[in-house]
Amino acid sequence: MRKQINNGLDFVVDKLTNSIENVNSGDSFPTEVSLLTKVELKKITQTNGWRFNWAKEIKVPERDIFKLTIVNNPNIIQGVVSLEVKPDHVFIHLIESAPFNIGKNKTYYGVPGNLVAFACKLSFQRGGEGYVSFISKTQLIEHYVTSLGAFQFGGQLLVINTEAALKLINKYF
């Protein structure tokens, strides 16, 4: 299998919310994060407006693909994240909001923040003390520093430490 090159993540943390928040009404909805199944892959294709090839991503053995859904509404995927548990932290390979949660006409705020908070929570569960890292697009580094509390570790590598992870987890969970 050809190695994928990560040119940096470019998700936008639109708002740190409690769970996810309906843009029009301001109502918050509790969410669940669970493993994406191969059957669900049919819903998240580039033909359906998704940017990434999640079918290819799910085949990488060391990565786990998680979906974000609203509690009691598991059939509508709000966002997806690809994570790899390393010995001392969790690495985010890809993160994407559903097409209807992107842009000025999005349905919900808070999807990317929710998925990053989940990565932090998983890091604590797996012994990584909340540490999460990812490669950022250069133009978004400052955005992640400000919105997520990440710090630049060199080049485009960003790290969320224990303190920042706890703030995100407390916000979402």
Image (cartoon, rainbow, N blue to C red):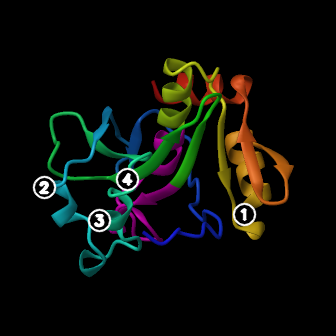
Q: Can residue 36 be seen in this view?
A: yes
Q: Is residue 53 above or below residue 168?
A: below
**Which residue is outermost to the right?**
154
Q: Kindly identify which numbered label has been placed on residue 39.
A: 2
Between the residue at mark 3 and the residue at mark 4, the CA separation in whole angstroms equals 12 Å
Q: Nearer the viewer, residue 8 or 85?
A: 85
The part of the image, by quadrant, that contains residue 60 is bottom left
Give, as a three-letter code, the residue at label 3.
Answer: Ala
* Label 1 residue SS: helix
Answer with the quarter of the image where residue 68 lies: top left
Mark 2 vs 1: CB contact within 8 A: no
3D distance between C-alphas at marks 2 and 1: 33 Å
- For marks 1 and 3, give the one nearer the viewer: 3
Identify residue for label 4.
Answer: 80
Q: Check disc 1 and report the residue beneath it.
A: 140
* Magenta residues (range): 94-116
Give me the residue at 51% from left, 26% from top.
121
Viewer-proximal residue among 168 and 22: 168
167 left or right, relative to 31: right
The local crowd at label 2, few if under 14, some if 14 to 19, many if 20 or more residues have their Cα within 10 Å, is few
Badge 1 or badge 3: first in the primary sequence: 3
Q: Which of marks 2 and 1 is in front?
A: 2
Which amino acid does the dot numbered 1 rest on? Leu
Relative to residue 149, is residue 153 drawn left or right?
right
Q: Name the residue under label 3.
A: 55
